[in-house]
Each structure stands twice: as structure tokens, then as C-alpha cells.
Image (cartoon, rainbow, N blue to C red):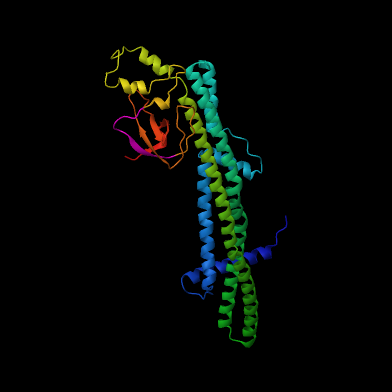
Amino acid sequence: MDFNVKKLASDAGVFFTRAVQFTEEKLGQAEKTELDAHFENLLTRADSTKNWTEKILRQTEVLLQPNPSARVEEFLYEKLDRKIPSRVTNGELLGQYMTEAANDFGPSSPYGQTLIKVGETQKRLGIAERDFIHSSSINFLTPLRNFLEGDWRTISKERRILQNRRLDLDACKARLKKAKAAEAKAAAEHELRVAQTEFDRQAEVTRLLLEGISSTHVNHLRCLHEFAEAQATYYAQCYQYMVDLQKQLGRFPSTFVGNAEATSPPLSTSPPAATLPLLQAVSPNPADGTLNPADVKPPASGTRKARVLYDYQAADSTELSLMADELITVYSLPGMDPDWLIGERGNQKGKVPVTYLELLS
């Protein structure tokens, strides 16, 4: 390998001279060409954009992948330009374990049936999470990385060149002040004109790049909207999956509870006479074993107003479908499941889940 010793020595000398000059400027012992206020504002805005983009990028990575080891692995795959292997989400893994446990305990048993239902929902949640991570990585993280690894590196490079041009310009100004002879002054003035031209040209190039930060903000704004949309879709899917699971679990027979109650002697063989009419009002229909809402009579006191928090689709004829933000009348009757109330809307009546309501009075 051939080395140009003279060029190496010259570059080292220039580097040392600029370092000394830069230090003297910091100490106020050398002249410094100041940039205009607009240029300084562009520099400040660019630095702020870079710093906050880095913080948002890192924290979004933590949000999407909390496991630091997995993040390091993904980073190495990206640097090696290799495809990141597909990773099973925690929800999918939990769903797999629940399904295997159900097969071991007996899929036809109440516990096995519940494990299968919950496991299937966990798998769906895991798949939704994987889709959200994939979408966010492409539409949000990638543009942020492209800015830091592309545009910002270009801006940093041109800023370093501008800094060197400014140091050269100030050095020429200093030599012109020190020149005494006419020939020395003429040479110094020529060097100053050349340095000023190069500085002005580089300042214009750097200024155009810095003004491009506004376009970067517009691009990141669009990406931010896409990220929020993907997150909203993900949470909406999760909510719907859990509502569906809640309905499925609500229709399961309470075998375990029934068995537990059967092992304990009853405290009384019959309900008090005062509550007997109310219990009869919510007793199952002897024909099909379901509650007949038309037979339910509201108590003389104890009715309340409630605001519906979420939409709810009735699972059968004994339940009342709900719409978010509507007001209904609710009340409870002896013998009812504490997680449910009787709801009334005009001449419509049926059971409603307590978790979907905000009791007002």
C-alpha cells in the first residue's frame, strides 16, 4: 500500500492549525465569522429534530419489542442485511400452552372447554399484535431510521465542511491583517476572495439541506398518522376479541360453581316469603330454561339510571342490546348474577352486563 507522506503531513498540519484556531475562538482570542440569525435558527431546528427523532425511535422500539435481547438480535440482522426470523408472540405462545393443557385435561371438560376458548382468543390477540408490530415497523420506524441514517448524515457532513470553510475564511482574514508588504497583501486578498466564495457556496448548500427539515416534518407527520391508525386498529381488534370471549364464557354452564355449592349444605330449604315473588319473576322459563324478560317485574324501589359505555350485542332473547352513550333504567333482583342487571329501554327489557354500564344515580 502506497502512502503519500507529504499529503499526510499536510493534512495533519491543517488539522492541527484548525484545532488551534477553534480553541482560540472559544477563548475569544481569534476572529470568528458569525452566521446570520435565520441560519442559526435552521441549525437549532435541525439539531432538535435529530435529537427528538432518536428518542421517539428508541422508545417506539421498546414499545413494540420490550425484550432488549430480541431488539439487539433484530439490530444485528439489520446490520448484516439478513432477514429477521419470524418470532412467535407471547399471546400466541400462551394460546398454544392453553390448548395443549386442554387436550391433557380433557377438551370436553368444563375446564378444558374454557382453556380452548381462552387459548384461541390469546392466539388471535398474538396475531393482531404481530400485524401491528409489522405495520408500525414499515410505516413508522423505517422512515425515522432513513432520516437519521440518510438525510441527517448528509446534513452533518455538509455542516462539517461549512465549519472548515469558515475556519479557512477566518484564517485568511487574519493573514490579511498581518500582511505588511504589498505583494503579501495582494496574495492574502486573493486567498480571502477564494475562501469567501467557497464559504458562501457551502453555506448555500447547507442552508438548502437545513430547510429540507420542513419536508421531513411533513413526512414524519404522515407516518405518525399511520402509526396511530395501526395502533387504533390493533386495540379495536383486541377489544372485539375480548368481548367475543366474554360472551362465550358467559354462556358456559357454571359446573364448577354448581358442584362447589352442592358439596355444602344449604342454609335454608326455601327463600323468605317476602322475596319469593321477585325470585319467581327471574326464574327460568320451565319450557326452555331461559329467562323471559316479559315476566320480569321491576321492584317498587331501587331502579337507577345508567349510561352505556360500549356497544353490546345481545347473545340471546333474554339479553338487551346496547348502544354506547344511551341512557337506560337498570335494577337488580334477588337471585341474579351480580355481574348482570335488568335493563329497560321503553318497552324493551333484558339482561345487561354491569361492566358495560356507568351507574348514574
Is 23 placed left or right of 351 in the picture?
right
Please tell me whether residue 306 belongs to the stretch shown in magenta: yes
Please tell me whether residue 328 belongs to the stretch shown in magenta: no
Q: Nearer the viewer, residue 321 or 76?
A: 321
Is 48 placed left or right of 332 in the picture?
right
Can you give x and y, in whole percent of width and height, for residue 199 in the image? 61, 73
Q: Residue furthest right?
A: 2
Q: How many marks?
A: 0
Above or below for 193 versus 2: below
Can you give x and y, in whole percent of width and height, for residue 351 in the image? 42, 29
Q: Quadrant of residue 171?
A: bottom right
Q: Nearer the viewer, residue 10 or 241?
A: 241
Quadrant of the snapshot with the C terminus: top left
Residue stretch in magenta? 297-309
Say which residue appears at 37% left-offset and 12% top-offset. 262
Q: Quadrant of residue 343?
A: top left
Q: Quadrant of residue 13?
A: bottom right
Quadrant of the snapshot with the N terminus: bottom right
Q: Nearer the viewer, residue 91 or 23?
A: 91
Q: Residue furthest bottom?
A: 182
Can you give x and y, in whole percent of width and height, for residue 175 in the image? 58, 79
Say which residue appears at 56% left-offset and 36% top-offset. 128
Question: Can residue 65 be seen by looking at this rendering?
Answer: no
Q: Nearer the viewer, residue 17 or 173?
A: 173
Q: Main secondary structure of the magenta part?
A: loop
Is 236 placed left or right of 307 in the picture?
right
Say which residue appears at 54% left-offset and 65% top-offset. 43
Question: Can residue 185 be seen by looking at this rendering?
Answer: yes
Can you give x and y, in whole percent of width and height, for residue 135 in the image? 59, 43
